[in-house]
Image: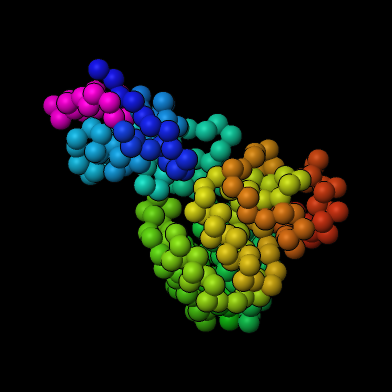
Amino acid sequence: MGTHLAGSSHLFGSLEHVEGRVEFKNMRPEERQEKILALLRENGRVKVDALAETLQISQETIRRDLTRLGSEGLLWKVHGGASLPQPNGEGPFQLRMTEQLQEKRAIARTAAALFHPGDTLFVDTGSATVLFAEELRRQTGLTVITNSLMIAQTIARSDGNRVFLIGGEYSDEAMQNIGALAVQQVSQFRTVHAVITVGSLDIEGAMDFTLEEAEIARAMIDHARNLTVIADSTKFKKTGLFRVCPLNEIDRLITEACPGDLSQALANAEIDVHIASGSS
């Protein structure tokens, strides 16, 4: 007796209706995890609460199952659930912290040097912006507003800088605050700069793979005078799902390699491109 997933326009796969509910309680962990994968393959994305209801097990058990399956590369843990791995997308945050590390460190050093005492900055959550914060903390006289716990902690450990941590719904996967409350809190500030990292960048503009992160980035852009995007060159080969901003809203791009086919579009948008040195 199988399960049927009702269609839903929700970002995560919704298990709203089950025909002929199966008794799952006595399943062995490996059987339950295989059922989770089957549901995920059918629906693309799943939510922890919906899985718990469908499989008649606690949400904590579901989270442990997702963690194990994620560690084996069979799914990606995302806020509130899981998704199928996407070859052209972004992986889990801790994995991204290890990818293109030398390039991202060079980009971070180059970007940090562009800011000076008295500057006010929004900084969003990303592996590149975490490294950027590590470089930025060497400076003084800055005010940083961020939704990233890691970035807030990094800046707070420096002398002579102020940091404001945006509140909201906490997502442990990337140690960040997201959601409507976070977006509303961003609107209480007005900064000179917004520094964001993106999931992809092409002639259409900057994109992200996560709706919640795209919403935070858009809010920061709307309440800042200037926009700096930091992105390694792998971002030029991807296509994100959620729009962040068009090219003509970007003032500066910091990367480690010539954007190639994107160069003319960046020039047409009058974007100041900085190529980081020391990445190879």
Residue 271 screen position, x and y as percent: 79, 59
Please give left or right for residue 33 compared with residue 259 in the image. Answer: left
| Residue range (magenta) | 18-37
Q: Residue at x 36, y 29 (%)?
A: 5
Q: Residue at x 40, y 48 (%)?
A: 79
Q: Nearer the viewer, residue 202 or 119?
A: 202
Residue 181 screen position, x and y as percent: 43, 66
Q: Residue furthest left?
A: 26
**In the figure, residue 149 lies in which quadrant?**
bottom left
Q: Would residue 153 be seen by someone viewing this image from the given angle?
A: no
Q: Residue at x 67, y 55 (%)?
A: 245
Q: Considering only vertical position in the picture, is 221 above or below 243? A: below
Please give left or right for residue 67 compared with residue 133 in the image. Answer: left
Please give left or right for residue 247 compared with residue 87 in the image. Answer: right
**Quarter placement of the C terminus:** top right
**Quarter placement of the N terminus:** top left
Q: Would residue 161 be seen by someone viewing this image from the given angle?
A: yes
**Can residue 22 be found in the magenta stretch?**
yes
Residue 146 screen position, x and y as percent: 50, 67
Q: Residue at x 49, y 69 (%)?
A: 184
Q: Considering only vertical position in the picture, is 160 above or below 249? A: below
**Can residue 263 be found in the magenta stretch?**
no
Q: Considering only vertical position in the picture, is 169 above or below 88? A: below
